[in-house]
Amino acid sequence: MFLRFVSQSIRRSPRRKAMTVAAVAMGTAVATAMLGVMLDIGDRVNREMRSLGANLMVTPKAQSLPVEIGGISYRPVSSQDYIPEDQVQKIKSTFWQLNITGFEPVLKAVASLSGRNVPVEGVWFRRGLRGADGSALEAGLRTVNGKWKVDGYWIDDRDRNDDKLDAMVGGAVARRLGVKPGDTLQLFGQQFTVSGVISTGGEEEDRIFIRLEVLQRLVNRRNQVDAVQVGALTKPEDDFARKDPAKMTPKEYDRWYCTPYISSIAHQIEEVLPMAAARPIWRVADNEGKVLDKIRGLMMLITLAALASAGLTVWSVMATTVLERRGEIAIMQATGAGNGLVAALFSTEVALEGAIGGLIGSWVGLLLAAWVGRAVFQTALETPAMLGPVVVGAAVLAAVAGAAQPLRRALLLEPAVALRGGE
């Protein structure tokens, strides 16, 4: 009897029912798309930002303890003020090795050009390596700063011919010296060919980049690097991450160690490179967290607004339905049906409409999320399998919540008054 009443009720006013289903489907589609993007956007945005520069700097411990007296910088005496190049690869052996998207060893020197000192950096441009488990991986300047604009071409580390001396010149240096790709430069008494001019809008435009092993040979610093820039996917810092690990309980320390905070990744790099100190580049790390929080907050607001809009539409449709059927409700009450049964009948009807709209909307939303992924990130987003059922459940709750107030008002009306047509 109950199901027959519900099925007959659904068949009434098909246009109005279709409006309810369409409203719920539209709200659910937007909510599904926003949630699908929001749940996967963290790593996507992080990876995009990682191609714009490093968020960790690893330096020798001797260089990480500067002392300044009277404007003059002094370093503590140390037996090793460099990082061995053959130890750099250990960065990819930490607990969070999969979160480390790239690293770039750097050796620094200064060359004199046209009467001015110009910083020269020896780097890996793109170096193919083998991990501890035998897996292939890449490291170098291009893995950390892949979005740099280059006029010309990148130097290829796979062609490491010592007789071929190439250099990549920052845009500011190129403009000052009047050089372009194909021209030559005199560095450390050697003739270098300019392979490309780098434009970044930052301090990198005041530098010249050459292959690491070439600079090591020219300045007689074999197997030495001054710093390693690291790009890592991290979780935005929160109050817990800012606690001093030395004051944490064992349980808190395990939680901190096993969470990809930038501070915990830096700590693990120091464990595998005991001669070095890893320090977050806070201006980069903080901005990443703020950007992600704002994007997630905006998407959650749009999701809630879409579901609220669907609920308001259901409220409007249900108010009209209850107004038209208040005589029917009064007859059911007069013949012994309790308010609970009447509410269950109408709530089931609305819930079914919400479920149908939710199913349609979640399917459309997943397609929309996939389109957003391809349009923005050039790859499909990975949406959790439970997203669809959760959104359908939210659609049903939004529909029932929208119908609650009109139905409650109808149930409070006395049957005799409703049958006489009064308010």
Image (spheres, grey):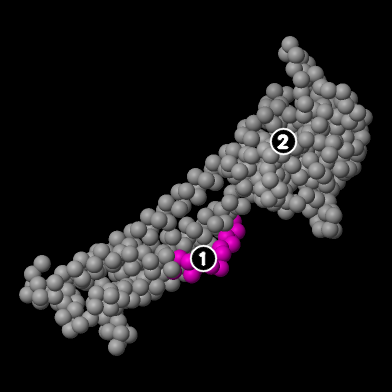
Residue drawn at (81%, 24%) of the image:
110
Q: Hey, which residue is sitting farthest top in the picture?
A: 70
Give the residue at mark 2.
279
Q: Which quadrant would the N terminus be assigned to in this image?
A: bottom left
**Amino acid, disc 1:** Leu
User: Eyeballing the image, is 201 above or below 375?
Assistant: above
- The x and y percentages for residue 60 are 82, 32
**Amino acid, disc 2:** Arg
| Residue 339 located left or right of residue 119 | left
Does 187 appear in magenta? no
| Residue 199 located left or right of residue 76 | left
Which quadrant would residue 355 be assigned to in this image?
bottom left
Label 1 Cα crowd, 10 Å radius (few <14 / some 14-19 / many 20+): some
Residue drawn at (72%, 36%) of the image:
279
Label 2 Cα crowd, 10 Å radius (few <14 / some 14-19 / many 20+): some
Residue drawn at (83%, 41%) of the image:
273
State the extent of the magenta-drawn residues as a range.
378-392
Does 387 appear in magenta? yes
Which quadrant would residue 218 be assigned to in this image?
top right
- The x and y percentages for residue 318 are 25, 68
- The x and y percentages for residue 227 are 79, 34
Q: Which quadrant would the C terminus be assigned to in this image?
A: bottom left
Label 1 secondary element: helix
